[in-house]
Image (cartoon, grey):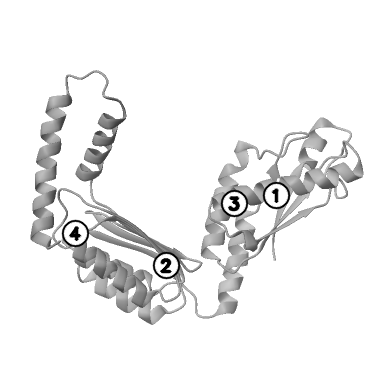
Amino acid sequence: MPADRRQLVRTLLSVALLACGALLAPAVDRGDAQQGMLATSATLFAAPQFAVRFGRKQLRISGITASAEHEIALLQLARDQFAGAAISTEFSAAVSIPPDWETLSNRLLYLVAATESADALLDPDHIAIRGVSRDGPAFETRRALLGGAITAGQRLQSDVLIISNRAAFDTLCRRNFASIATEPIRFAQSSTRVRQASYALLDRLAEFAYDCDTARIALVGHTDATGSAEWNVQVSRARAEAVAAELARRGVPRDHLIVEGRGAAEPIANNATVTGRERNRRIEIELR
């Protein structure tokens, strides 16, 4: 659809939604239909955003686009710049977008292509990108290209680490991992359910795995001395599997996770006390 016709459709749709809202205002219960209309209206009138996430050969592009032609151009750019990556998109329309939206979103995607992994966001007030790149000159050239297109009052925030070689990258990953894995993941007695208090640690581990995409994370399960040795090995492995499932739900590839169960063989506290047994029921996290 040509850009001018698409803009006309956006305008007519917004007018229609306003009219429908006025007609439906007196209604007490319109069910799912009304909720769907309100959700659509919220999307159309919300501040536009455009997001790109890249890592582990996975590229996701989502947000507001200027036209059907803009979407085609983004897909072509993605295929050209992210060869071999699995590409997924979720595009939507808005009633109003900034005049340079198409240029900025295209150049932001082009900038992300100069990284190993990155999260990037564009909205009317600022552009932000966080990630890792091994090609400093290409990244700086593309960042300057994006910077030349931003409008007055718009901010460009870049938090991208430039790594000169693989060894330096691996060293940095290990240093970051050491700052994350400072505590074990806890469980209740005779349970394989991860305690909610450990969710923040799982979130940090998932982000680490996203940035350090070649890392292998070992999840080593331990129990207290309650029960037989055979039972404790089974429980400790089941707990490690439960943590692996939580990380997989957060996007960590399952083949990047190593699961082990060691039962009660390696206590870190006295099993004769309640506090000691609780400390012994744990998952230790190792980088391999």
Label 3 crowding class (10 Å Cα cut-off): few <14, some 14-19, many 20+? many
Is residue 202 left or right of 21 when viewed as pictured?
right
Amino acid under disc 1: Glu
Look at mark 3 in the image and give the residue it sits on. 247
> 167 or 59: which is nearer to us?
59
Can you give x and y, in whole percent of width and height, for residue 201 in the image? Answer: 59, 47
Is residue 224 left or right of 104 when viewed as pictured?
right
Can you see residue 222?
A: no
Distance between mark 4 and mark 2 Cα atoms: 27 Å
Rendered position, 200 above or below 258: above
Give the secondary structure at mark 3.
helix
Give the secondary structure at mark 1.
helix
Can you give x and y, in whole percent of width and height, for residue 186 in the image? Answer: 70, 41
* Marks 3 and 4, the one that precedes in the sequence: 4
Distance between mark 4 and mark 1 Cα atoms: 45 Å
The dot on residue 160 is 2
Amino acid under disc 4: Ala
Look at mark 4 in the image and give the residue it sits on. 66
Please tell me in which quadrant of the rendered image residue 276 appears.
top right
Give the secondary structure at mark 4.
loop
The dot on residue 122 is none
Label 4 crowding class (10 Å Cα cut-off): few <14, some 14-19, many 20+? many
Amino acid under disc 2: Val
Can you see residue 94?
A: yes
Please tell me in which quadrant of the rendered image residue 41 appears.
top left
Look at mark 1 in the image and give the residue it sits on. 241
Q: Residue at x 13, y 56 (%)?
A: 6
Can you give x and y, in whole percent of width and height, for residue 151 in the image? Answer: 17, 62
Quadrant (top left/top right/bottom left/bottom right) for the C terminus: bottom right
